[in-house]
Image (cartoon, rainbow, N blue to C red):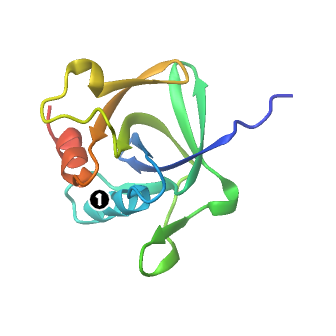
Amino acid sequence: MASDPASIHASAVLVGDRGVLIRGPAGSGKSRLAFDLILAGRAGQIPAATLIGDDRVRLTARDGRLIVQGVPELAGMIEIRGLGIRTVNFTPEGIAGLVVDLDATDAERLPPPEALKTLVSGLEIPRIPVGRGYAALPLVLAFLTTV
């Protein structure tokens, strides 16, 4: 019998059919970016965005894809700084199509191509490194809406 994959400290949102995995240290803005993406979806700036998980998610490599799953005990819950824990619509899983690393030490104005991808569970995933103090949302929106 296979065991459940361990959870990691991260948040994730499904934007259209692309899972956005948001990593970073505590207090770096993972929940804020997740909620901002949900709001951008509601505003029509990007395809509909739905929470997969906030604070903890599970990652599984399956059939050449990285599956991101929320943990059941936190299903639909997201922290909104200043309001506490709130409930939003959620989906149990999505296929990761983007990793956003907050407070990334390798963030640059013009990052080299190798900085814009990462290996997670042996799978190469597009990546956005965001430096401390920089707004992540415009970068993610640009990635999702440009070629």
Q: Residues within 10 Å of mark 1 (few under 14, many from 20)?
A: some
Q: Quadrant of the N terminus?
A: top right
User: Residue farthest to the right?
Assistant: 1
In depth, the one of 58 and 42 nearer the eye is 58
Residue 130, given in percent of the width and then of the height, sits at 27, 43
Residue 143, given in percent of the width and then of the height, sits at 21, 39
Q: Residue at x 22, y 20 (%)?
A: 113
How many numbered dots are placed on residues in this image? 1
Residue 70, given in percent of the width and then of the height, sits at 59, 50
Q: Residue at x 21, y 48 (%)?
A: 141
Question: Residue beneath label 1, please?
Answer: 41
Q: Is residue 145 left or right of residue 18?
A: left
Q: Is residue 144 left or right of residue 37?
A: left
Q: Name the quadrant containing residue 77.
A: bottom right
Mark 1 belongs to which amino acid? Gly
In depth, the one of 69 and 80 nearer the eye is 80
Q: Is residue 56 visible?
A: yes
In depth, the one of 90 and 129 nearer the eye is 129
Q: Residue at x 42, y 55 (%)?
A: 30
Q: Is residue 46 visible?
A: no
The answer to whether 64 is drawn above or below residue 142 in the figure is: above
Q: Is residue 109 left or right of residue 11?
A: left
Q: Quadrant of the C terminus?
A: top left
Q: Residue at x 57, y 19 (%)?
A: 63
The answer to whether 82 is drawn above or below residue 34 in the figure is: below
Residue 48, given in percent of the width and then of the height, sits at 33, 55
In depth, the one of 39 and 16 nearer the eye is 39
The answer to whether 4 is drawn above or below residue 136 in the figure is: above
Q: Tell me the SS state at disc 1.
A: helix
The answer to whether 1 is drawn above or below residue 123 in the figure is: below
